[in-house]
Image (spheres, rainbow, N blue to C red):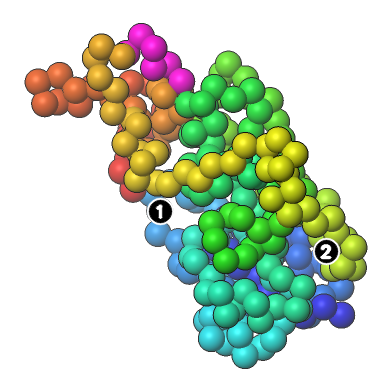
Amino acid sequence: MKRVVFFGSIGLARKCLEEIVIGQDIELLGVCCSPIISGWREDESVYSYCESNNIPILTFDEVEDLSPDIGFSVRYDKIIPEKVIYSFKQGIFNTHGGILPEYRGSYCNINALINNEEEYGVTLHYISKGVDVGDVVAIKKVKITEDDTGFTLYKKSEQLCYDVLRENIQDILNDTNKRIPQEDLIQSGHSFGTYYAKSTLEKKSIGLENLKDSMNIVRAFDSPYHEPAYTEVEGKKIYLRVSYGPSVSNN
């Protein structure tokens, strides 16, 4: 029986923990998670679920001392220290919201639209030192439609993350999963790039002279819950949307 630690905080992570991980023949040692404070996430968090079900909430030091077999990470928002990563006998497996190695880092859904990609997807990969550079286990993709926005791609990525973990967890537990070094993918012709939050969010400011050529940027930042793309006139922001929802929130 494999000894497992789970990493994740948001509702998607709770769903994966409850519906996929706990149902396996494993010993769940505990979970690394944080309370969720959000103006738009309404589904139950991992933290709340663990408190209600008496599942240990662990610190990184406690994880290292446990010498576990396998870790599963679902949209976990903390950087796991290298010493913790290598305390796992088989490693930590992460669901990343982008296609690797092309889309490492954050806001991959937004950058896929800005870059006019035809497909978007998620990757199940090993966590290693570095930003999303670990070996690839599996990739799941969807076509980007004309109606997609950054928000709709994010919601699609949640289902893809759930599916890619569900489809591969048994092979991981049996230590028979695929493992493709990203360097092999790059050498076979795949591009690679890393996207960061600050540089991505700077793209939402559109000059008036560029408005007619910026529809992909408008689509990328269109969300019912976050500040959309904008242009400025006389120092005032004019928000740009392709759809309408609840009032804009900066939370």
Q: What residue is drawn where x is 54% and y is 61%?
A: 130
- The kind of secondary structure element at disc 2 is helix
Q: Is residue 54 above or below residue 80?
A: below
Examine the residues drawn in magenta and state their main secondary structure: helix
Q: Nearer the viewer, mark 1 or mark 2?
A: 2
Going from the N terminus, do you reach mark 1 or mark 2 first? Answer: 1
Give the x, y percent position of residue 102: 61, 40
Q: In screen coordinates, is 67 left or right of 56?
A: right
Q: Is residue 235 above or below residue 122?
A: above
Give the x, y percent position of residue 101: 63, 44
**Dot label at residue 38:** 1
- Quickly name the residue at label 2: 172
State which region is magenta. 211-216
Give the x, y percent position of residue 188: 75, 39
Would you say residue 78 sits in the magenta stretch?
no
Closer to us: 130 or 15: 130
Q: What residue is drawn where x is 43% and y is 47%?
A: 196
Q: Check contact, mark 1 vs mark 2: CB within 8 A.
A: no
